[in-house]
Amino acid sequence: MASERIILGIDPGTQLLGFGVVRAVGKKAEYVDMGVLDLRKEKDAYTKLQAIYDCITEVCKSYHPDELAIESPFYGKNAQVVLKLGRAQGAAIIAALESGVESVTEYAPRKAKEAIVGNGAASKEQVQLMLEKTLGVRLESEHLDATDALAIALCHHFQTETPVAAIKGKGGWEQFLRDHPDRIQK
C-alpha cells in the first residue's frame, strides 16, 4: 500500500506569495488547498519576511506537509530582485523546516511548467487550465501565484513518483551502450 504524502508548493515573492497543497498517494495526487499572501501594502522589507514566515507556519500547522517544493529564483537582469526573492524563499523554507517538513526541493519555473503543461514557456493561464484538468477541480483565484505554487507541488509529486521523468535523453542508444558496456551481450 502506497504511503500518503502532503506536498506544499510555494511560489515565493515579496509582493505576492502563492502556496498550494496536494495530497499524494502512490501515483495519484489530489488538490487540498491554495492561496496567496498579498504583501503589496506592506512597505517594510523585514515586516514582509516576518509575514511570509508567519503565513507558511500557519499553512504548515493546518496541513502538516511532509515535503516542500519551492520555486527557485529566476536569474534576471536586476540583482536586487533576485536578492529579494531569495530572502522570501529563505523565510518560507525556514518556516517549513521549523514546522517539521522533512525535505525541501527547488524547481525552476520552466521545470514546473514543463511538468504540468509539457512546455516550459507555457503561460500562467495554460498552467491553471492543465492543473484543473489533471486534478479534476475548478481553481478560482484572484492571483495566478496560487496556481503556480500548486504547479510546483504537483511537479514535485511527478518528479519523485516517477524519477525517470527527470532524466533527459542524451545521445540515444549509442550513448547508453557506451555508458553501460556491461549491458552488451556478446
Image (spheres, rainbow, N blue to C red):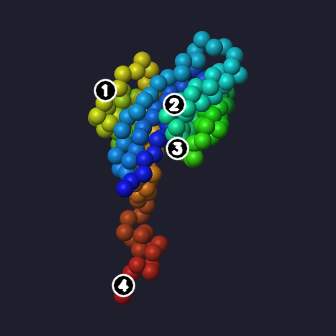
Residues at discs 2 and 4 in contact (Cβ within 8 Å): no
In the rendered image, which residue does mark 1 sit on?
138
**Going by the picture, which residue comes out furthest to the top?**
41
Q: Report how far apart the C-alphas of labels 3 and 4 lie in the structure.
A: 44 Å
State which mark lies toward you, 3 or 4. 3
Q: Report how far apart the C-alphas of labels 4 and 1 lie in the structure.
A: 52 Å
Residues at discs 1 and 2 in contact (Cβ within 8 Å): no
Of the numbered discs 4 and 1, the one sitting upstream in the chain is 1
In the rendered image, which residue does mark 4 sit on?
185
Of the numbered discs 1 and 2, the one sitting upstream in the chain is 2
Of 36 and 145, which appears nearest the observer? 36
Q: Where is residue 53 in the image (x, y as percent from the top left)?
A: 63, 28
The amino acid type of the residue labelled 1 equals: Arg
- Left or right of 37? Residue 134 is left
State which mark lies toward you, 4 or 1. 1
Looking at the rendered structure, the secondary structure element under dot 3 is loop
Of the numbered discs 3 and 4, the one sitting upstream in the chain is 3
Residues at discs 3 and 2 in contact (Cβ within 8 Å): no
